Image (cartoon, rainbow, N blue to C red):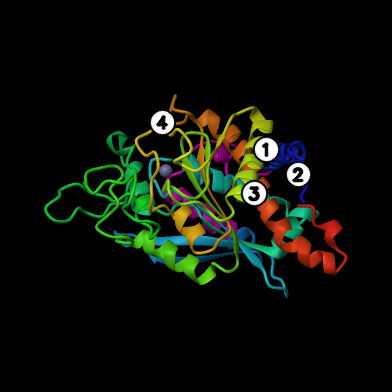
Amino acid sequence: MYSFDVHTVYSMCVSMYSAVWSREETTERNYYTRYHNMSEVTAWMEQMKRENPDVVSSMVYGQTYERRDITLLKIGLSSTGRKKAIWMDCGIHAREWIAPNLLLDFYQQILRTYKTDTKVNEMMKNLDFYITPVLNVDGYIYSWHNESTRLWRKSRSPGTGGCTCYGTDLNRNFYANWGMVGVSTDCCSQTYCGTKALSESEARAVTDMLGKMSEDILAFLTIHSYGQLILVPYGHPNISAPNHDELMEVGLGAATAIKAVHGMDYTVGTSPDILYYTTTDPFSGSSRDFARLIGIPLSFTFELRDKGEHGFELPEDQIQPTCEEAYAGAHHIITYAHNKAFYRYAATSQQHCSLGL
Ligand SMILES: [Zn+2]
């Protein structure tokens, strides 16, 4: 139904890195090979808007507990036809610093090539990309504070009922079988699910946005680390997605694309099916599960490198290869989603051959 050449994508990847490095501009040579604090992520978003005013806009769609803006970039070419959407978010867990890097890397590549690459151009005409580089802004900033806060995971809202610990696990706080499995009601726990579903303003912001857009979103990708996994809905062991076979097929295709780049193995499945090496095992209340529950057909969690050797503190020399392989995996899913939606329309207008994204 679709074609995908990972070697072509990888070559494109490499050539685009070269293109970045050959330019003299505000971003230094190693910008995409080091981690970025929140100020730098915000500056990057501003730069993308400034350099690509016709295709990039931003939107504040919520506020964190500490009243910081939650901002997304919308990236796409204007079109007279009805566009579909791809959602990507990162930084829901503060300490997973590789995740925002992936998004920055992914979209600088797309923005640098859409004018010259007919396939990327076609994708930008048919799809709008809604990308949130950092969702848990408070936690992310806190994780950059000093060495002792580097591994902060949760939001920064204070505990209730006399609990003196801070933070709720935002990826246990969504209205998706909330509080049922793989969560803690101890506010000091890393997997504390909050006092109720959507108790956290960050989870409410995503929920509201997805609710407005759900009919148009073809794919929902939420980026985490670590573990080298591609997780599909659902995290609850007794519930299965109606298109489970499709999710697995597309997820396995993404894992194959990833492996072709640097030989890394990514495991695909639901969290109950995968022998998850952390304490999380099956878990409910995730944004991935919520996205599928409200009808978004393709919903995936990427858990990027590694498998535990360095964990959340992945060395910076692994940023580039991690982004290269994840690019191939995400590209596979987006290509599938695009072709499934638009080949049907294109076939009626005899243009389907030009849409081999
Ligand atoms: Zn995570």
Q: CA distance from mark 4 to mark 1?
A: 24 Å
Read off the magenta span: 23-49
Q: CA distance from mark 2 to mark 3?
A: 10 Å
Q: Which residue is mark 2?
A: 4
Q: Amino acid at mark 1?
A: Ala
Q: Secondary structure at mark 4?
A: loop
Q: Secondary structure at mark 1?
A: helix
Q: Residues within 10 Å of mark 2 (few under 14, many from 20)?
A: some
Residue 317 position in % (x across, y down): 54, 28
Q: CA distance from mark 1 to mark 2?
A: 9 Å
Q: CA distance from mark 3 to mark 1?
A: 10 Å
Q: Amino acid at mark 3?
A: Ile
Which of these two is toward me, 63 or 292?
292
The label shown at residue 277 is 4
Please identify the quarter of the rendering in which residue 295 is found: bottom right
Which of these two is toward me, 211 or 146?
211
Residue at image location 42% in from the left, 61% down from the top: 70
Residue at image location 48% in from the left, 60% down from the top: 293
Q: Amino acid at mark 2?
A: Phe
Ligand 1 found in image quarter: top left
Q: Residues within 10 Å of mark 4 (few under 14, many from 20)?
A: few
Q: Amino acid at mark 4?
A: Tyr
Whichever of callouts 4 and 2 sits on the residue coming sooner in the sequence is 2
Reply above or below: 276 against 154. above
Left or right side of 250 for 196: left
Whichever of callouts 4 and 1 sits on the residue coming sooner in the sequence is 1
